[in-house]
Image: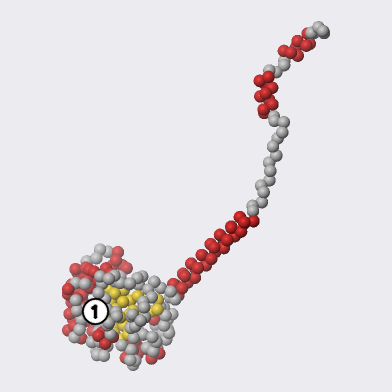
Amino acid sequence: MRKRTKRDKEIDSFRLTDEAEAEINSGYPDEVPVEEEPSPAPKKHRLRRFLVKLAGFCILLVIADIAVLFFTGELWFNRPDRHRYPLHGVFITEKQGSVDWKNFARQDIQFCYIRATKSTAYEDENFKANKAGSAKTDLPVGMLHLFDASMGGKEQAEHFIEVCGDMQGRLRPAVDIRRSFVYKILPADYDKQSAALVGFCDRIKEEYGCMPVIKCDKATYENVASRSEFEDCPVWIVSEFGSPDESIEWDIWSYDPNGRFNHHDNSSRIEMMLLDKGISVDELYI
């Protein structure tokens, strides 16, 4: 046996322990794993994504088509049954421009109202032409006043009478009591409005022998038109986004602001209305 030299002893003194070797080996594994490239997605996944995108595009296309139909007046919320409500009419203002009444009256309408006045001084720009033109047709036509709740009712009636004059052979006058956008911002004083409307109705009855038709929305019906002072006034309800509430006793219903008709200058839409079933146009004559 070889005698251990001083050199052998020095080598032994620097030999690593088993624990140190194990720790070094764990930090440097013999085999380094190689990252595998992701496999391409199955074809069925690509097809699914394509179908989802196609469905989304189709939905957007349908929504765009519906929006165009609403904008052009081809589609609206209300489509009353023509068999149940056979008598339809329109409301004409200066927005429609010059009207060719001879041909306009031949369209599928059974009655018409024309805006005449507003408040105590305003007169619709085309009222005189519309009154004269409609008089040459067989279409039943009435005149409407746009009520101003801040002004006296009797004074407004005097203005209406002065502008409209003789109403023989016409439908009974109508008065629109809906609050404008400006007045809707302010608190409503329905008692004051009702008192002024009484003065208007009394003067109209004195002049023409009948109470006027009251044009209103749900709020003004419940707070004004439904009061006992106006029980002899026919009700013209405006409900453009659905049928009138069952609690409202109405005679005329404005159901669509976007009616399309020929034989008038401007391309603006025309408000459409109808008579309740069981009511004839003859009942509206003065």
Pinpoint residue 82: horizontal percent, then vertical percent: 36, 80
Question: Image quarter for residue 53?
Answer: bottom right
Q: Secondary structure at mark 1?
A: loop
Look at the image and tell me in which quarter the C terminus lies.
Answer: bottom left
Quarter of the image for residue 239 reads: bottom left
| Residue 229 in the image, given as x and y percentages of width and height | 17, 75
**Residue located farthest toward the bottom when viewing the structure as drawn:** 136
- Place residue 221 in its image quadrant: bottom left
Disc tally is: 1
Residue at 37% from the left image edge and 73% from the top image edge:
78
Taking depth in this image into account, of 39 and 161 the one nearest to the observer is: 39
Taking the image as shown, residue 22 lies to the left or right of residue 122, namely: right
Q: Residue furthest right?
A: 2
From what the image shows, is residue 228 above or below residue 279? above
Of the pair 75 and 165, the residue shown nearer to us = 75
**Counting other residues with Cα less than 10 Å from the Cα at mark 1, is it few (<14), some (14-19), or many (20 or more)?**
many
Q: Amino acid at mark 1?
A: Pro
Q: Is residue 103 left or right of residue 12?
A: left
Q: Which percent across, then down, holds residue 46?
A: 62, 56
Look at the image and name its color scheme. Answer: secondary structure
x, y percent for residue 1: 82, 7
Which of 249/154 is in front? 249
Q: 50 or 215, which lies in front? A: 50
- Examine the rendered structure and indicate whether residue 55 appears above or below residue 230: above
Q: Is residue 252 visible?
A: yes
For image coordinates 68% across by 41% down, the residue present is: 35
Whether residue 176 appears in this view of the structure is: no
Residue denoted by label 1: 234
Q: Residue at x 33, y 89 (%)?
A: 139
